[in-house]
Image (cartoon, helix red, strand yellow):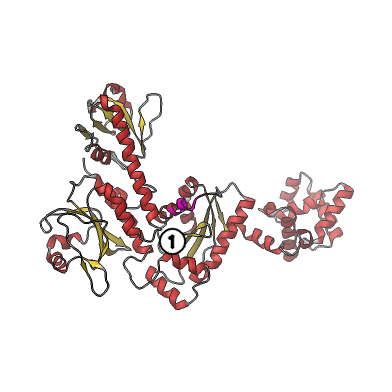
Amino acid sequence: MHNNSNDYDNISERFLLNGQILIDEFADFFAETALFGREDPYRLTGVRLFQKEITLSENYIYLATASQVTEEFCHYENRTFLIAGQTDYHNFHESCVVLMVGRQEQFAGIMNSAQQVFEKYREWDRKLQLSLNSEAPLDNMLEASVPIFKNPLFAHDTNFYILACPYRTGPMSVWERDSRTGRMMVPLNLIHEFKVDLEYLRTLSTKGPDIYNEDLRGYRILYRNLWVNGSYEGRLCVNEIQTAFHPGNFAALQYLGNFIELCIQHHNLFHLNLGTDTRRFFTDFLDGKISDPAKVQDFLYFLNWNRTDRYLCLRLEAEQLDEKMHSSVATLGHIESQIPEGRAFIYQQGIVVIVNLSFENSSVAQVISGLAIILREGLFKMGASAELADFFQLPQGYFQAKTALHLGEKYDSMIWCHRFDEYFLEYILEEAGENLSPKLLCSHALHVLKDYDSKNNTELYKTLKIYLKLERNALQTAKALFIHRSSLFYRIERITQLTKINLDDPKERLILQLSYCLMEGTKTFS
């Protein structure tokens, strides 16, 4: 079988396994292993026992003994099976992936091993997510990845400075310290060798994981170039020193590289003059601690943003009030992986996301749609600002997002996303009601109609509301009230006589509509 390393071109919501990764792991524990299948997609999230009565999901691998396998298995399509023992692959549909491991009597051990493999990769994924918001993200990521690759890893930038190297062993190079910067770097003689090596020069243009042969170093190197906005920023390397490479290592390295590329953008790993990471900058900017236009401009230049780009501010809060913040931290990487140019960070006991909509000419609707699954599965509610035309408007955009979330919970608590544009009227009316009660803000005409209706058993108050809502369309209003048009005209005449209002005046009509909203709730005219 061949390995499709490009399946992980972007960070998915989690690292998904396939048959090849599992068979690689099983080879360490069982003498007999075999993998069959034309295609082997990365889609597996766990292992389940095979039972004929249940519907099989493509996201699980199903464990059965060889004796359980019959010709009926041909009816299952696009599924993955783990068989304890050896059986005929022709009993399965050609679209299936089948792993045959060990012997039938090792059924329990195979089940335990499969569960341990999935748990191992889940734990690795969790550590990568948490590392994104740590003080030393690269060190933490590479250290967490050592059990996955079972070989030493390191990363360097375009100038061969060492960004992270959890440990060295065997014939690996001894790093040299740059006297100017104090940073560790690849030895100068080795750099010169690389620069004249034709194969190395060829590798500088590769976009996914690949192998660099052993001619120069004496051992093979599995590498992945790091790219940001089409620019080569460095390389992630695994040295084949302790164990031989497995095909599944390609997908794992691609996934790890995606996280490191996020760090390049967000943690300033390759630029020494910014002085702080992006999340700290955004926090200080929203707090009003940074107002110097020159400092902001330097920061925008580092991000390759412009002050007058289109921006969006989002605020997410967990539905569970006692939600632990470490789980929210793990969500940051998920969020940023779904937004082409977004920055997520913890702020005021919630998550804030700053999005540059101009980066890929994105729309607010596209951004919100891209976060739908994360919000649903994480039980988050979200408030979204209006589209902003200036980076310096972000503090007000944050206020809009927070206000939209508050108003949305009050008026539409079953909805997971609330946009400030949709609660503009509610915000104005709530602000207006801060100093005066709604009763004192409302048009006196409505109080007159309510009193008249109460004393005379009429419906003038309701008639005026429907008449305004339907934009003074007499035919539609009469149908809505189940009365004849002549009756409607009589009521309208009586309303104007009692209240002295001029319904031809747009300002008076607006005041009346706002008054209805204040008295009955802002959804009256929605």
Q: Is residue 129 magenta?
A: no
Quick check: 17 above or below 146? Answer: above
Pinpoint residue 382: horizontal percent, then vertical percent.
53, 54
Q: Residue at x 45, y 52 (%)?
A: 326
Splitting the image into 4 quarters, where does residue 70 fall? top left
Would you call the spot at circle 1 few (<14 residues within 10 Å), some (14-19), or many (20 or more)? many
The answer to whether residue 459 is visible is yes
Q: Is residue 328 magenta?
A: yes
Splitting the image into 4 quarters, where does residue 464 fall? bottom right
- Overall secondary structure of the magenta stretch? helix
Q: Secondary structure at mark 1?
A: strand
Pinpoint residue 337: horizontal percent, then vertical percent.
39, 54
Image quadrant in which the N terminus is located: top left
Of residues 389 and 61, the one nearer the viewer is: 61
On the rendered structure, is 99 left or right of 376?
left
Q: Residue at x 26, y 33 (%)?
A: 99
Pinpoint residue 237: horizontal percent, then vertical percent.
23, 56
Of residues 283 and 293, the one nearer the viewer is: 283
What is the count of numbered marks? Answer: 1
Task: Identify residue for label 1.
Answer: 343
Pinpoint residue 225: horizontal percent, then vertical percent.
25, 59
Going by the picture, which residue comes out furthest to the left? 215
Q: Residue at x 43, y 71 (%)?
A: 306
Question: What residue range appears in magenta?
Answer: 323-329
On the rendered structure, is 356 left or right of 77?
right
Q: Residue at x 58, y 55 (%)?
A: 405
The answer to whether residue 472 is visible is no
> What's the residue type where badge 1 is placed?
Arg
